[in-house]
Amino acid sequence: MLYREVGQYKTTYEADHAIFPLLQDRVGIAVILAIAFLAVPLASSEFVLNSMLIPILIFALAAIGLNLLTGYAGLVSLGTGGFMGVGAYSCYKLAIAFPQVNILVPILVSGFFSAGVGVVFGLPSLRIKGFYLAVATLAAQFFLSWCFVRLPWLYNYNVSAAIEVPSRTLFGIPITGPTATATTRYLVVLAIVVAMTWLASNLVHGRIGRMWMAVRDMDIAAELIGIRLYRTKLLAFAVSSFYAGVAGAMLVFLWLGASEADSFDINASFLVLFMVIIGGLGSLLGSFLGAALILGLPIVLRTLPGTFDVPITSATAEHLQFMIVGALIIFFLIIEPHGLARLWQIGKQKLRVWPFPY
Amino acid sequence: MELLYKIFIDPFVQMGTAPDLLVQTLWEGLVGGVLYSLIALGFVLIFKASGVFNFAQGIMVVFAAMSLVALHALGIPAFLALALTFAVMLALAFAVERLVLRPLVNQPDIILFMATFGLTYFLIGFGELVFGGEPKVMIADQLYLPRGAYDIKMLGGFVSLQKIDIAAAVIASLMVAALAVFFQKTRIGRALRAVADSHRAALSVGISLEQIWVIVWFAAGIVAIVTGIMWGARSQVEFSLQIIALKALPVLILGGFTSIPGAIVGGVIIGVGEKLGEFYWGPLLGSGIESWLAYVIALAFLLFRPQGLFGEKIIERV
């Protein structure tokens, strides 16, 4: 009823190309942003911010990075955890080496280090594809994990072999380190994630995104119409790793506060891949939905038995949680292999034609 | 200069001066490689016949071994327990076909890959719930698996060969031979290859996809039982064993996803390369290079043969 494009005429090419051509979508996104920036910090408790919203946003950013590579450019990667680690460790080195620089600079610059590493490990993608490439990117994952443990220079020869985040301020308010409140960290994360999502959206709707999609759909055909494969593929690796790197830096600096090498092990890579696939390949919205589902599910499952007073031990609960997560992954794949984003699209289409079935 | 010497000359000098150590390292690599091959074999079977990259093979190995030990702990004689484990894996194959594969037929590969991830999670949770999380001892003696080692005097030193390793190598070769015959000569084997070529064409000549999938998953289950017994007899049966599945991946890309001999040769190359690298070059880089060396070896091979050593030639049409 309310969700109709009737009467909204597009009179310019700009209007036609707009990402949100419908007024209702524009209003909707504005309302969501307003809630995220204003209402959530006021209404949410420390616990909700710290254990749900901040990690969901950070992992959504990593998922966007992987989605650019896997969903748009069609290159499956299992090295996201490693690239996130590169971001975290380089951010740490930069923040320690240049204490006077605004902390946002190392967080964003660390993305470039990660991008560089990503390009190096993306080189095999010129020769190999599909699952062979996925396994090849595992080489990156294992090599980088090994580096995080074996190169003490990376964590400044700490005895604990962990990186600990120094306290830094932005406009006089602490945003990293133990003194920063969850609300300020949430706002910083949100601002970075929103800005980078906007950037990603522009990338995938523009020439570069179309080149990636052409390569994804058939790389030989893409080459025949004049797309330079090696540049396009390496660019996809660079951009994807950049996003992963920034997400990794934020993970340590704005969420965990301190971290060891196993925060960035193979499980992190798989987790992000889950989010991308469950959320929807080739959809930015899907990255957020996937992150929310994959991170939110265990929390919900953990609190459920307590609410209903079901007497089970914590070990049993954990095993059940594994089973339920596994079963739900299969269930979601069966009901909608194209991910949650596709469900959302179907819902929108239903709204448009309501009350008619089609 | 010092570094170059350590990389290019010193290891070979060591190999020359202590040939018995070299033989021992080669043997250990070979045996490790055979075990990698066994896991890789499970992957290859399923990939060949359904195009599914089955991440759950690792947990299937653990699950099979755990079932066997748990059944025996209930007081069932060892060989009856083994038979019952076969039944468990058959039931698993039926369940997977009915609940996971059939609803997802004709979906892109990556979706099926992801579904096997879900299966892995489910089996981890289910297994720990049923069998408990603590490590268990494999019933090697009850299954008449040999114990101890032969010490062979050669090349001015001793080389120690574990009997269980020899048994593993023999059983693995027997199983590979049996599988090769099964795939090449039998009616079902031919049907499997037809399904691997094209689902639709196979269906149209009257091959039942459902049956075929149950058969392949069961075959992979049998491989998992054997792998589980062998790994379990060497160390312990525990859930962390399932990450050895990740070790099988470089073997797969080295040998080619679709080749049974590839899985064997790839496993041996990776196993030997890994042990040699760890033993002779490891101290130079700091230990633990085993974790990624296999991937680098595989990657180096891939740059020259993108389809793996024995993979089918990739033909692409626009």
Image: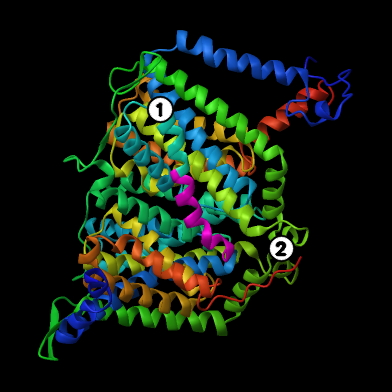
Residue B293: image quadrant is bottom left
- Was residue A216 drawn as part of the magenta stretch in this picture? no
Residue depth check, mark 1 versus mark 2: number of the one nearer the observer: 2
Q: Residues in magenta?
A: A113-128
Q: Quick check: can you spot residue B222?
A: no
**Label 2 SS:** helix
Residue A274, position as x, y percentages in the image: 50, 43
**Label disc, if present, on residue A220 of the rendered structure:** 2
Residue A26: image quadrant is top right
**Residue at left 48%, top 68%?**
B253
- Considering only order in the chain, which callout, 2 or 1, is on the residue closer to the N terminus? 2
Q: Residues within 10 Å of mark 2 (few under 14, many from 20)?
A: some
Residue A98, position as x, y percentages in the image: 33, 32
Q: Quick check: can you spot residue B189?
A: yes
**Magenta residues, dominant SS class:** helix
Three-letter amino acid code at the position of disc 1: Ile
**Residue at left 33%, top 71%?**
B35
**Residue at left 81%, top 22%?**
A354
**Disc 1 is attached to a residue of which chain?**
A
Cα distance between the residues tagged 1 and 2: 45 Å
Three-letter amino acid code at the position of disc 2: Ile
